[in-house]
Amino acid sequence: MAVEAARSLPGVLKQLRTLLEPLRKEEPLPPQTAVGFFTDTSLCIGCKACEIACKQWNQLPAREPVWAGTSYDNTRELNAINWRHVLFIERLGRHEEGSHAGGGTAGTVAAPTELPFFNPDRWLMLSDVCKHCAHAPCLEACPTGAIIRTEFDTVYVQQDVCNGCGYCVVACPFGVIARDALGGTARKCTLCYDRLKDGLEPACAKVCPTDSIVFGPVDQLRQQAEARLTQLHERGLREARLYGADDTILEGGLHAFFLLLDEPAVYNLPERPSRPSRHVLPASFWTALAALALGLFGIFSFRRR
């Protein structure tokens, strides 16, 4: 009997190891250079090649185009099946409305710049995408650890771990992440993580015909963005500005940042996005204070009776 038990012991241990295998913690991959996007809206022509390439590479479903009433934009928003969104912002007849960003007073005609394309009557275009924040609110809000930082310092949603709770959706100040209507899990741009592992650039940057979307190391992109901003200012485009290229946004900046030709609000970007985690302690304090006040009120009311 003892001999048979000894013989069956290795089989039991093997089965036990098989059962515990899913719980084994993998060692993190060695960190690589942090990469991201620099999107120069002054070069965007609204061709939507980035949208199509993103859908094709990531096998995202398409929907029948509809007339959205927002210029030539029928994508309308970033969501679970649209990881790139080209905005068309009509800035026509601005000289009749009053001043334009960068100077002028109400009722005056905005002076044209040296570049005819940048005259007041124009479209502003922006290929919007997940910002891959240095301190991502969605990652902080995820209760299951489904959202991680990859070895390339990008923000990635593990579909096999996500439980579809939606906390990340409400935590994102940019309205980027959304739950899939079919699977129920949260989905967003992965910065083509599968391509990065093979040494390839993301599909959207690969196909951009004007190099409006530039992919590369974040530090290098920031230098390129500063140089481009200086160039535009020298050419008379004083309203040009960078968004998310420094550390002022979300206490660390964005790894997908933009050169804009107007106020961030014009591009549907928040001027000062907030991290929900910063409101936890104040909200907890006031909740505890309110509970204490109600408790004391109840005690005194009970004693009076």
Image (tube, rainbow, N blue to C red):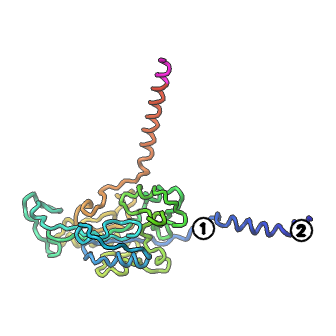
Q: CA distance from mark 1 to mark 2?
A: 38 Å
Q: Which residue is mark 1?
A: 27
234 to 144, vertically: above or below: below
Whether residue 85 appears in magenta in the rendering, the answer is no
Residue 4's label in the rendered image is 2
Residue 236's label in the rendered image is none
Amino acid type of the residue that numbered disc 1 sits on in the rendered structure: Glu
Relative to the observer, which residue lies in front, 142 or 264?
142
Q: Quadrant of the N terminus?
A: bottom right
- Return the x and y of residue 5 as percentages of the image width and height: 87, 65
Query: Total number of numbered labels?
Result: 2
Q: Secondary structure at mark 1?
A: loop
Whether residue 301 appears in magenta in the rendering, the answer is yes
**Residue at screen point 22% across, 64% down:** 262
Q: Secondary structure at mark 2?
A: helix
Residues at marks 1 and 2 touching, judged by CB atoms closer than 8 Å:
no
Amino acid type of the residue that numbered disc 2 sits on in the rendered structure: Glu
What is the magenta range? 299-305
